[in-house]
Image (cartoon, rainbow, N blue to C red):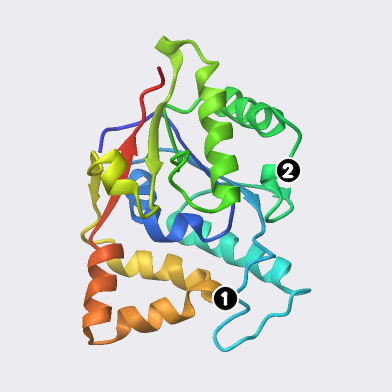
Amino acid sequence: MEQENHVLVIFPHPDDEAFGVSGTLMKYRDMGVPVTYACLTFGDMGRNLGYPPFATRESLHKIRKKEVEKSAEVMGVEDLRLLGYRDKTLEFEAPGHLKNVMSGLIEEINPSRIITFYPGYSVHPDHEATAYAVVDAVKEIPAEKRPSLQLVAFSNQTLEDLGEPDIIVDISGYEERKKEVMAAHISQTGPLLETLASETVEGDEAHSTWMTSEHFYSYDIK
């Protein structure tokens, strides 16, 4: 990891940051790098209502808002932007709207690096809409001024189409703090946290997947 002027993280849902990037963000913060996390929705159409259920469809909005605020606090991210879009509707925003919002964020923050999903390789329609909006916004920036793109991809065809990730961040020493970030999103992460705590093959596999390193792809705009 290199020193950055400012890292901008853009995801559509609370907890999107917890699994694949929170260790990386904590390393940046410990390096003194400013991090802004822009979360587009409150994830209040998510299927999970706790394990066992403790939320209702009506209360999930407030619960997940508190969860992402707690996650940001644990990570040391002081600039959390909650943009307030409706969950599971980002793909239906007017053409160009999200791109313009992303352009405004980038112009304001002037990041040297942006972390978001990889367009075409992030499964969920909200993920894809966010990814394409970010990439389209960056395309409009002159090449010499563009921030670096560090993208998360996790669809089944990822390795076949993209090859191995070319950015691997060792998060050794951040395991316990990352568990705290994941625990902040307890309405969504309860079963996984139980698996991580178990002395089973599944627990070992989950630990290897989430707690030792975080994998990304760089993205060169043509």
Left or right, 97 with reference to 12: right
Please tell me which of labels 2 and 1 falls first in the chain: 2
* Residue at figure coordinates x 41%, y 21% from the top left: 221
* Residue at figure coordinates x 38%, y 84% from the top left: 194
* Frontmost residue, 37 versus 213: 213
* Residue at figure coordinates x 23%, y 46% from the top left: 168
Kindly identify which numbered label has been placed on residue 30: none
Q: Which of marks 2 and 1 is in front?
A: 2
Image quarter in which the C terminus is found: top left
Which of the 4 image quarters holds residue 207? bottom left
- The residue at the far right in this view is 58
What amino acid is labelled 2 in the image?
A: Phe
Residue where numbered disc 2 is placed: 92
Percent position of residue 59, x then y: 75, 74
Which structural element holds mark 2?
Answer: helix
Which structural element holds mark 1?
Answer: helix
Percent position of residue 209, x then y: 27, 64
* Above or below for 116 versus 133: below
Judge the density around disc 1: few (<14), some (14-19), many (≥20) Cα neighbours within 10 Å: many
Left or right, 149 with reference to 56: left
* Frontmost residue, 35 versus 32: 35
What amino acid is labelled 1 in the image?
A: Ser
Percent position of residue 114, x then y: 45, 34
Q: Is residue 211 visible?
A: no
Residue where numbered disc 1 is placed: 187
Image quarter in which the N terminus is found: top left
* Frontmost residue, 87 versus 64: 87
